[in-house]
Amino acid sequence: MTDAHLVLVSHDGEGHATGVVPADPDLAQLSVLDLAATRGDGVFETISVGAGHPQAFAAHLERFARSARMLDLPHPDEGVWGDAVHALAERLADHDEAWIKIVLARGVEGRSMPTGWGYGTVAPDYRRERTEGIEVVLLDRGLRSDVAATSPWLLAGAKTLSYAINRAALREAMRRGADDVVFVSSDGLLLEGPTSTLVIRRGTELVSPPPELGILPGTTQVDLFEAADEWGLTSAIEPLTPAGLASADAAWLVSSVRHAAPLRSVDGVARAVDGELSAAMNGFLRRRTH
């Protein structure tokens, strides 16, 4: 497998990470009884790598630990997992854009040994999505916006391996002739994409929905908001509605690997693409060194 790299994270009997071992990505590594495969019982992060530099690295590790805590998994040792990410990033240093996925799962059912690994490879070419934009549809997530507070066992806002619903939503978007999805809560608030964070521009302000609505805290969105003043913009976190998206001057779905993809239509209705700001955002994201 070209430009693909794998490391395994070993654990002791108490669930503590103990080290990183290189492995062959072309060979079988996971037991068919592992709960990662049979139940999706685990968490993951996908980290963008620019010329060998893991981007938003600390934020990804923090979110990784947060998701593990929500699933009652062992706390990921920052040193060991950091070693795993940096080992993979070094092997991808010759590529301008790559990505690394780190996974922590509960392990083989009936045992107390977690399973952990990191996988890295070259990123796809997203130039079209970043410049021409993407078409999205709004889909009801079927949960209220207060689900994280009322029903924490539903794990809203955790980045888990249970991605069947997200994949089904993307297939529904394709059936409707679109590229991606923005989820809407059952009480009418905009949430996030299956693998991305929603950002809109309203005049000179960038706005994104709050994580308290049961959505994943966006590492890419945070970096963009910290850079907003470079483009003469301010930023805010506040609830958004479909009407607010329709009236926005521009909108994007932002994520670690695809970066900032402007929305060129929503539910079949064309909207303006801010090409200049999109280029500035993506240039900034590609240049990050931490």
Image: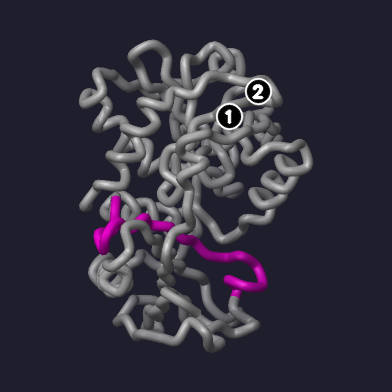
67 up-or-down from 231: above or below: below
140 up-or-down from 288: above or below: above
Q: Is residue 44 magenta?
A: yes
Mark 1 vs mark 2: which is more N-terminal?
A: 1
Residue type, numbered disc 2: Asp
Asked whether residue 192 is in view, the answer is yes
Local crowd size for mark 1, using a 10 Å CA cut-off: few (<14), some (14–19), many (≥20): many
Q: Are marks 1 and 2 in contact (CB under 8 Å)?
A: yes
Q: Nearer the viewer, residue 168 or 12?
A: 168
- Residue in the picture at 36% in, 26% down: 277
Q: Give the x, y percent position of residue 157.
A: 50, 44
- Residue in the picture at 33% in, 76% down: 17
22 up-or-down from 58: above or below: below
For label 1, the residue is: 145
Q: Give the x, y percent position of residue 204.
A: 33, 13
Q: Give the x, y percent position of residue 26.
A: 52, 85
Asked whether residue 65 is in view, the answer is no
- Residue in the picture at 48% in, 37% down: 261
For label 2, the residue is: 187
Write the start and end of the magenta stretch as one range.
35-55
Query: On residue 130, which mark appears?
Result: none
Q: Quadrant of residue 81?
A: bottom left
Q: Is residue 127 left or right of residue 134?
A: left
Q: Is residue 232 left or right of residue 272?
A: left
Q: Classify mark 1: helix, strand or loop.
A: loop
Tag count:
2
Q: Give the x, y percent position of residue 136.
A: 63, 33
- Residue in the picture at 61% in, 58% down: 162
